[in-house]
Structures are given as structure tokens and as C-alpha cells.
Amino acid sequence: MSGLIKSSIARKVVMALSGLFLVFFLGQHFTINITSVIDPETFNSWSHFMGYNPIVQYLLQPILIAGVIVHFVMGFVLEIKNNSARGVKYVKYKGSANAPWVSRNMIISGLVILAFLGLHFYDFWIHEMTYKYIDGSPENPTRYYAETVEKFAPIWRTVLYVISFALLGLHLWHGFASSFQSVGVNNKYSGAIKNFTKLYAIAIPAGFIFIALYHHFNPITH
Amino acid sequence: MKLHLKIWRQKDASSKGQIKEYPLNGVEGDMSFLEMLDVLNEELINKGEEPVEFDHDCREGICGSCSLQINGEPHGPDRMVTTCQLHMRKFKDGDTIVIEPFRAKAFPVLKDLIVDRSSFDRIQQAGGYISVNTSGNTVDANAIPIEKEKADEAMDAATCIGCGACVAACKNASAMLFTSAKVSQFALLPQGQVEATERVQNMVRQMDLEGFGNCTNTGACEIECPKGISLENIARLNREYLTASLKG
């Protein structure tokens, strides 16, 4: 087992499993967010549940944060190790001849997503923690919709969200199906997994982009 | 055909190399890439210059000796061929061709275009074999019934010639495709089961020790492999390794 922890294959598996967990979380996050377009009351009630349910707050939220940290820290570790595996670089390297840009540049899409997460945490998570634990404000199950829509009022934030979701799509395009290969799944279902990956990598980020644009162009008028 | 060659020249392992440029006339489309280099070397020798050193042996695409990075791709622009089977008809008159050694920390350059690929040998020695008593009572391998599909998959994995194109192509200089082929050729067969656990653990450990990078599933290795070794082998290696590690 000690060999497993230090091996290159274990690093792949850690990336794959944490990535798959985050893919699953993304689907759940989108399901809640799309209700902000369909039915604000549902959005408020689901958001309130996520914000105050003790299992979500004290079990699932720390697991999610750990999943994000493990994924990006391991991503950096792999990038550093992989860079050092080719000390002298090629004078001419035609990477596009044998692998798509998205597969070769996961670090770039990953860094954009990480920067986005910083903004996203500042926008929503820090705000939420301040509201509940620092200010000690009372529970208000009707505040979430207005707070969310308000966030998309500035064009700069909406544009940053749109760009980040586009990069998220590219990251998913390679990462989702690749995770299965890393844990040893390459069989008759791999074609279906790749097709589902493409669908997911387009639909979920496009859905998030739609939500951001919808709220930007449909502000709450008082 | 007239070509403009840009070739990596390096005196020895400890020297710093550089690209040197050579114009070359009279190249025929029917020449192999190595024959084109032979022509260049004859010119260099006649001029009293040091010829370009490169690895080659069978020149039939089966020994895995030739190992050139040609215009940014291992074994050049053609698919499913080694450098010795690449023909100059793939290039056009006036083309510039950049020729470099395979690059990886685990493949140090010895001279010019020759790299030391003994790291592959050490991975193989770490477990890429089956122990058979050959003291006169060896059972014929064909006496053991094996499903045709499994036998074919094992044979496909066994066609890996260990040229190192997978490492050269990979942006991470990973040796996963090579190691997975050498594990798979036994993992698929009953003869390979006895030492399966130790084999995969030892070979992966050696692969990591040699300083190869980590696989990130770009698939470049599969595209550039002159023998078409499939990524399915890497998934099998992952499965074999995880199973072996969980067994202890």
C-alpha cells in the first residue's frame, strides 16, 4: 500500500476520483441554480436548505472544499513533475499533430477555473459565512434569489463568469472521460462515456452561462 | 529533391548541443529517411566533417532502434511507421526538416541523435518476464487453451518494439504506453498470472524511478506509436496496478 501512495498511477487515480466527485457536484449545483430562472421560490427554498442543513454544512461542504483542494494541489504536483520529466525541450514540438489543445492544456483551463473559484468564493461563500457566522444575521429564506440576481448586475462579473464557464467546458471535455481511463475503465462502454462527456461538457457550462446572462439582462426592478 | 536540414548536434552526453543547418541536394522520394541521412553523412565524411550519429539496426521497422523526432513528431509525419520506414516522398522539394533526438530526462542524449533508452530495459527487467523452468520439461505454450480474443490482444501488446516514440510524443514524457504493453502481454495470458502482482508493482515502481512523467491521457502516444499500441493497455495497467496494490 505504501508504494501505491507514492506511485504515478495513484496520482492519476486521485486526480480522477476528485475530478469525478467535482463533476457530480457541478451537476447538483446546476440543478439548483437553474431554478433561479424557472422559479425563484424554489431557488430560495433549496438555497436555504443547502445553507442551513447541518449535514450539508458540516459534512458535505468540508468534503467539497477538500475535493477542490486535493484536485488543484495534485494538478500542480503533476504539472511540476511532468515538466521536469523533459529537462531539455524540443526545438520543434508538434503537439497538435497527435492530441487536441484541451488535452494538452488542462493546466491553463484549470488555472482559469481556480481563479474563478476565488471570485466565486468571495461572491457567495465569504458573503454567506459573514452573514451567518460573523454578523450573526437571522435566517431569511427569501433573500437568496435577490442576492444572486444582484451579483450579475455588473457586466465585468458576468463576462468573467461566462469566460470561466467556457474554460470549464474545455476542462470537462478532456477531464470527465479521461477520469474513467485513469481508474482503469476502457471497455465497450467507453464510447458512450465519451459521448456523455461531450454532452455534459457543453450542456452544463452553457447552462451556467445562460443563467449568468439571464440574470444580467433581467435585473430585479424595485 | 533539395532539402534544408536542421539537425541537433551534440558532442557527447556532457556537452551542450545545438541545432546545425545542412543543405542537402539529390534526395530521391524512394529513399528512406535513414538513407537520406546516409547521403548526408557521406557528404560530411567526404568534406572531413564529423558525420551525424543516429541509431539504427534492422531498417525494417521491427527492431525499435531508430528514434528520431522529425519536424516535432517521433518517427515523422507518417503513421504506423518507424523512422527507417518513413520515405522521403512524404516531403516536398525545398522543405525544411528539423531532426532532434527523443527528449526525456530518462532518455539522456549520448551523442547527436542517439539517446540512451536503457531505462526501458530496466523497466522490462523489473518484471516484464515469466519464470519458466527450462531444464528439459518445458510445457509447450500452445498446450494451454487460451481464448482467441485474449491471445490476439496479448499479441497486439507484444508487438511493442520499445522504440520510445510514446515517451517522445507525450507532453509529459510518460512511459505508460510502453510499460502497459509489457504488462498487458502477460496479464492477458494464463502464464502471466503467477507473477502478476509483483510484475506490475515492480515495473511501475521502476518506471517512476527512471523519472518518466505522469500520463494525462492526451492519447498522443497511441497516435504516434509505430505499432499502434492501444490506450486500452494503459487502462489495463491502471487496473492491474490498483488490484495488485489493494492485494498488498
Image (tube, coloured by chain):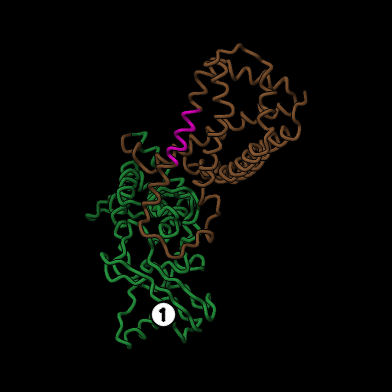
Chain A shown in which color?
A: brown
Task: Name the residue: 34% across, 72% down.
Answer: B9
- The question of residue B184 being in magenta is answered with no
Q: Residue furthest top?
A: A138
Residue B144 visible in the shown view: no
Name the chain under label 1: B
Q: Residue B246 location in percent, x, y?
A: 37, 34
Q: Residue B30 location in percent, x, y?
A: 49, 81
Q: Which residues are magenta?
A: A65-75
Residue A96 visible in the shown view: yes
Task: Name the residue: 54% across, 45% down.
Answer: A109
- Report the front residue among B130 and B54: B54
Please tell me whether the stretch drawn in magenta is mainly helix, strand or loop: helix
Above or below — where is B2 with respect to B136?
below
Q: How many numbered marks does the figure carry? A: 1
**Secondary structure category for the residue under label 1:** strand
Above or below — where is B150 with respect to A168?
below
Chain B shown in which color?
A: green
Above or below — where is B211 with respect to B53?
above
Above or below — where is B44 with respect to A19?
below
Q: Residue furthest right?
A: A221
Q: Residue A136 location in percent, x, y?
A: 55, 13
Task: Name the residue: 59% across, 32% down.
Answer: A26
- Report the front residue among A113 and B167: A113
- Report the front residue among B170 and B150: B170
Pointer 1 residue: B22
Left or right: B49, with B237 as reference point:
left
Assign the N terminus of chain A to one quadrant of the image. Answer: top left
Quadrant of the image occupied by residue B194: top left
Callout 1 environment at 10 Å: few (<14), some (14 to 19), or many (20+)? some
Residue type at numbered disc 1: Tyr
